[in-house]
Amino acid sequence: MSSGPEGVKKDEKRGPSTKTIVLIILITVIVCGTAIAAILLLRENDPAPTPSPISGIPVTEENVREIGDQIQDMVDRSMFETYYSSTWRFPDGSSPASSFLMGNSAGNNYPFYFTLTIAGESEPIFTSGILPLGTQIGEVVLDRDLDAGTYRALCDIHMIDENGEEIETNMGFEIALIIEN
């Protein structure tokens, strides 16, 4: 073995280099940071109770059934059934339809009236009277005389609550109007 100018042998190990120590510290910091981040992200937090869509009261184990019943009641009250003819045939634009039917099922919760509007127009060509539960009408005369032809019309349903106020709904369907002469 040879010795260097100051008597240090070239073959002797001096311990880990500075680069190795820095690399070990860096890896340790990364592993610890990842572990802390995982713990913080995966730990269970007590979630805030979800407010009820009905009352805004937080849903808890104690009231979940009651709130579920309230929601089901709202669904039941909003159900709607009608029966109608989808093609209304008129001998001319000012006579009653020869094939028309509109009914309010007895199982519904509300009376309703309906409006009829030609597709693409904004003003109704017919507005019915109120149909109580379990009733039907079989004759309609348009509020405006139409020329002969086939028209696509939109029939919108307007339910009325027990206070006589219109309930906001988006119910409607398409009707074919046939004016023969």
Image: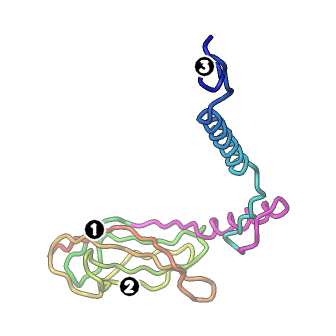
The C terminus lies in which quarter of the figure? Answer: bottom left
User: Residue at the location (25% across, 70% down)?
Assistant: 152
User: Residue at the location (33% across, 73% down)?
Assistant: 154
Question: Where residue 86 sits: x, y (%)?
Answer: 34, 65
Q: Earlier in the sequence, mark 3 or mark 1?
A: 3
Numbered range of the magenta stretch:
55-84
Q: Quadrant of residue 71?
A: bottom right
| Three-letter amino acid code of the residue under disc 3 | Lys
Dot 2: what SS? strand
Which residue sits furthest top?
1
Question: Where residue 134 sits: x, y (%)?
Answer: 56, 72
- Residue at the spot of label 2: 127
Dot 3: what SS? loop
Q: Earlier in the sequence, mark 1 or mark 2?
A: 2
Circles 1 and 2 in contact, beta carbons < 8 Å: no
| Three-letter amino acid code of the residue under disc 1 | Ala
What label sits on residue 176 in the rendered view?
1
Q: CA distance from mark 3 to mark 1?
A: 102 Å
Q: CA distance from mark 1 to mark 2?
A: 16 Å
Q: Is residue 65 magenta?
A: yes
- Is 118 drawn above or below residue 39 in the view shown? below
The N terminus lies in which quarter of the figure? Answer: top right
Horizontal arrangement in the rendering, residue 10 relative to residue 120 (left or right): right
Question: Where residue 64 sits: x, y (%)?
Answer: 78, 61
Circles 3 and 1 in contact, beta carbons < 8 Å: no
Q: Check disc 2: other Cα within 10 Å, few if <14, some if 14-19, many if 20+.
A: some
Q: Quadrant of residue 18?
A: top right
Q: Is residue 58 magenta?
A: yes
What label sits on residue 10 in the rendered view?
3
